[in-house]
Amino acid sequence: DAGVIQSPRHEVTEMGQEVTLRCKPISGHNSLFWYRQTMMRGLELLIYFNNNVPIDDSGMPEDRFSAKMPNASFSTLKIQPSEPRDSAVYFCASRRTSRTNIYGGEQYFGPGTRLTVT
Amino acid sequence: GNSVTQMEGPVTLSEEAFLTINCTYTATGYPSLFWYVQYPGEGLQLLLKATKADDKGSNKGFEATYRKETTSFHLEKGSVQVSDSAVYFCALRYSDSNSGYALNFGKGTSLLVTP
């Protein structure tokens, strides 16, 4: 399996521009997570999907951030407009959850997208 | 609320030294506890886990014991190698379904092992 795939790996953009980060979870996984990692705040959970439905978006910092999961194999995290304080590494993770394993299996992380907003 | 506190890094050790990275937690209910490792330029990988009190998780020479009485899950390794240089994250899994059984991570501890 190719693992969780994220693109782009690096993104440099100017303040005010729209940024879209993409994630392809592991095939067969039905839960997907978006995290943000910074030196100051560590690893923060932004939003979590189960079966393509957003379950908990309380970690999304503000309305400039939005996430979608149109199908089981694709999710996007969009920032519009971007600001310098959004600079961070954004991770996507997926896992398989079932009725017999409600806690879910291991969470597998993608390699991350390093976003720099100038 | 649920939270994890890790010792501040960076930690610098010589090869073959003994490693301890402290982790304590606060949580309602009975969380599961995890250690994840992040090698440079990569995403996080599960290193070990423990799902109930007194459980010991182990992998690749690393160990951690779930201590409910001290609310701790300290990571240890008897003899570190240069290849262990990475950032280590302690995490707990919420025990309530409303959170989707998501993970709550500590801030991470950077380990550098020198030859």
Image: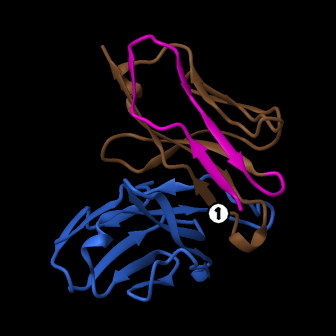
- Magenta-colored stretch includes residue B7: yes
Q: Kindly indicate which chain is depicted in brown in the rendered structure.
A: B
Give the camera-side residue of B31 and A8: B31
Question: How many labels were placed on the picture?
Answer: 1
Q: In this view, does A14 lie above or below A91?
A: below
Q: As rendered, which of A85 and A88 lies closer to the eye?
A: A85
Looking at the image, is A1 positioned above or below residue A23?
above
Quadrant (top left, top right, bottom left, bottom right) of the C terminus of chain B = top left
Whether residue A10 is visible here, answered yes or no, is yes
Task: Please indicate whether residue B85 sits to the left or right of residue A105 in the image.
Answer: left
Q: Could you tell me which quadrant the N terminus of chain B lies in?
A: bottom right
Q: Residue at left 30%, top 80%?
A: A20
Q: Is residue A94 magenta?
A: no
Q: Left or right: B84 with respect to B102?
A: left
Instruction: Kindly state the secondary structure of the residue where label 1 is placed.
Output: loop
Q: Which residue lies furthest to the top in this view?
A: B16
| Chain hosting mark 1 | B
Q: Is residue B58 left or right of residue A82?
A: right
Give the letter of the blue chain: A
Q: Where is residue B53 in the image (x, y as percent from the top left)?
A: 83, 38
State the residue in front, A17 or B47. Answer: A17
Residue sitting at x 55%, y 49% = B106
The residue where tag 1 is placed is B102
Q: Which amino acid does the dot numbered 1 rest on?
A: Ala
Q: Give the range drawn in magenta.
A: B1-30
| Residue A17 in the image: above or below residue B100 | below
| Foreground residue among B61 and B80 | B80
Q: How crowded is mark 1: few (under 14 residues within 10 Å), some or many (20 or more)?
A: many
Can residue A26 be seen by looking at this rendering?
A: no
Residue A116 position, x and y percent, is 22, 67
User: Where residue B102 sits: x, y (%)?
Assistant: 64, 63
